[in-house]
Image (cartoon, helix red, strand yellow):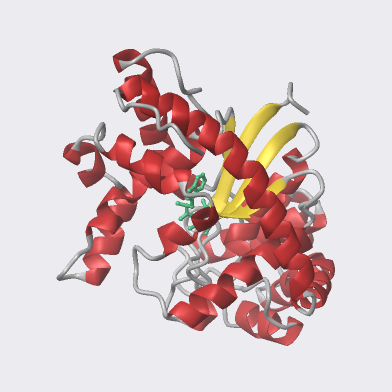
């Protein structure tokens, strides 16, 4: 276990997880778990950069943990934990904040998008969010970070900060590599297929939730926005159809070309019905297991407690090293 390379990744419990989170991230975490020493975190500190109802945040944090496990992430093999349980995340984030340039944070697309939505009274946490994300990754000496396309820019900052710290003090952090899947790295909204599918979308028909019913999924796929071309093609001119084809192909394992061939001259009705069924079938085991886990709260509590203890050990070790290098006097108690 010690010699395996390290993975860190996380999801915000800021909404219920979507098919985008699953195909862009979770599914790949499952595929990587045998070959790496993986830390999979529920990043609640990140979630409060936008307003949260405390009791909903608590409930969603547990739901996300259950969905990790229901997706096939084995809690025996991986370290599953809640970010706020390991205080080193916030502490290293502070140190990294003091190395991050305002200009770097200003350039972040996600910040620009989110801040334009929030409007006035922006909080500083939203701005410095990427330094916290860098801290998450660098604390564990991570080699690889499996994420969707939208996190690429944040990851580049984490790499820059690792290198900057190493140059300024001495070799401390690994410079992590992104792992972005070839297919599924950017699942689009069902209602505006030129925008990514997001759990915080106001339009409930825009996303498919891992925890919804088969009927809800069916109805959302049926209502998915397409185009007036009327022929199933994998083309940038038909972003809605392209998105559905991506989902269909990932869930059935069939190639896009072969699917396109089969629906030649058919219009969209049957294609949409079959896409919905492919998604529903693909998610069925996950949904069943999720419901079972949510009725076993004691089990979930054991998992996140054990996970935090393991993560705490590794994170403290790194933080002690960092504090020493920046010139803090080591404290004489633990
Ligand atoms: P979050 O919570 O927005 O999303 C979790 C993961 O899902 C991916 N994802 C998508 N992939 C494909 N298509 C989509 N429509 C889609 N929407 C989301 C995201 O890329 C991500 O991999 N900042 C991160 C959380 C985070 C993190 C970290 C990730 C905090 N610290 C350290 C990795 C390492 C975020 O907001 O993800």
Look at the picture and state if 19 lies above or below 270: above
Q: Quadrant of the N terminus?
A: top right
Quarter residue 267 falls in:
bottom right
As rendered, which of 333 and 195 lies closer to the eye? 333
Q: Position of residue 208 (x, y in %)?
A: 61, 73
Q: Position of residue 60 (x, y in %)?
A: 57, 73
Left or right side of 183 for 262: right
Q: Position of residue 237 (x, y in %)?
A: 47, 57
Q: Position of residue 156 (x, y in %)?
A: 40, 33
As rendered, which of 196 and 242 lies closer to the eye? 196
Whether residue 183 is visible here, answered yes or no, is no
Look at the picture and state if 182 lies above or below 11: above
Look at the picture and state if 39 lies above or below 318: below
As rendered, which of 140 and 194 lies closer to the eye? 140
Left or right side of 110 for 266: right
Q: Residue at x 40, y 75 (%)?
A: 52
Q: Residue furthest left?
A: 120
As rendered, which of 259 and 187 lies closer to the eye? 187
Number of numbered discs overlaid on the protein picture: 0
Q: Residue at x 22, y 62 (%)?
A: 123
Q: Residue at x 49, y 53 (%)?
A: 236
Q: Residue furthest front?
A: 332
Whether residue 101 is visible here, answered yes or no, is yes
């Amino acid at each position: 276990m010690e010699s395996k390379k390290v993975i860190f990744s996380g999801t915000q419990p800021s909404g219920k997880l979507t098919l985008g989170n699953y195909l862009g991230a979770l599914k790949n975490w499952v595929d990587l778990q045998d070959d790496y020493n993986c830390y999979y975190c529920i990043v609640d500190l990140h979630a409060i950069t936008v307003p949260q109802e405390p009791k909903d945040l608590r409930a969603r944090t547990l739901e996300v943990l259950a969905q990790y496990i229901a997706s096939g992430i084995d809690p025996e093999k991986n370290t599953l934990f809640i970010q706020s349980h390991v205080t080193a995340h916030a502490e290293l984030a502070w140190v990294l904040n003091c190395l991050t340039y305002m200009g770097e944070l200003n350039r972040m697309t996600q910040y620009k998008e989110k801040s334009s939505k929030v409007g006035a009274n922006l909080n500083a946490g939203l701005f410095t969010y990427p330094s916290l994300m860098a801290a998450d990754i660098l604390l564990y000496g991570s080699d690889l970070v499996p994420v969707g396309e939208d996190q690429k820019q944040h990851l580049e900052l984490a790499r820059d900060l690792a290198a900057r710290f190493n140059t300024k003090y001495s070799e401390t952090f690994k410079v992590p590599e992104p792992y972005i899947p070839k297919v599924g790295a950017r699942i689009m909204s069902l209602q505006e297929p030129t925008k990514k599918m997001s759990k915080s979308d106001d339009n409930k028909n825009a996303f498919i939730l891992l925890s919804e019913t088969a009927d809800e999924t069916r109805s959302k796929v049926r209502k998915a926005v397409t185009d007036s071309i009327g022929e199933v093609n994998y083309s940038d001119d038909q972003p809605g159809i392209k998105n559905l084809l991506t989902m269909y192909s990932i869930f059935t394992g069939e190639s896009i070309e072969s699917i396109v061939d089969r629906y030649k001259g058919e219009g969209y009705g049957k294609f949409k019905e079959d896409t919905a069924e492919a998604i529903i079938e693909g998610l069925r085991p996950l949904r069943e297991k999720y419901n079972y886990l949510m009725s076993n709260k004691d089990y979930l509590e054991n998992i996140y407690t054990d996970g935090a203890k393991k993560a705490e050990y590794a994170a403290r070790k790194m933080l002690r090293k960092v504090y020493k290098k920046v010139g803090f006097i080591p404290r004489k108690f633990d």
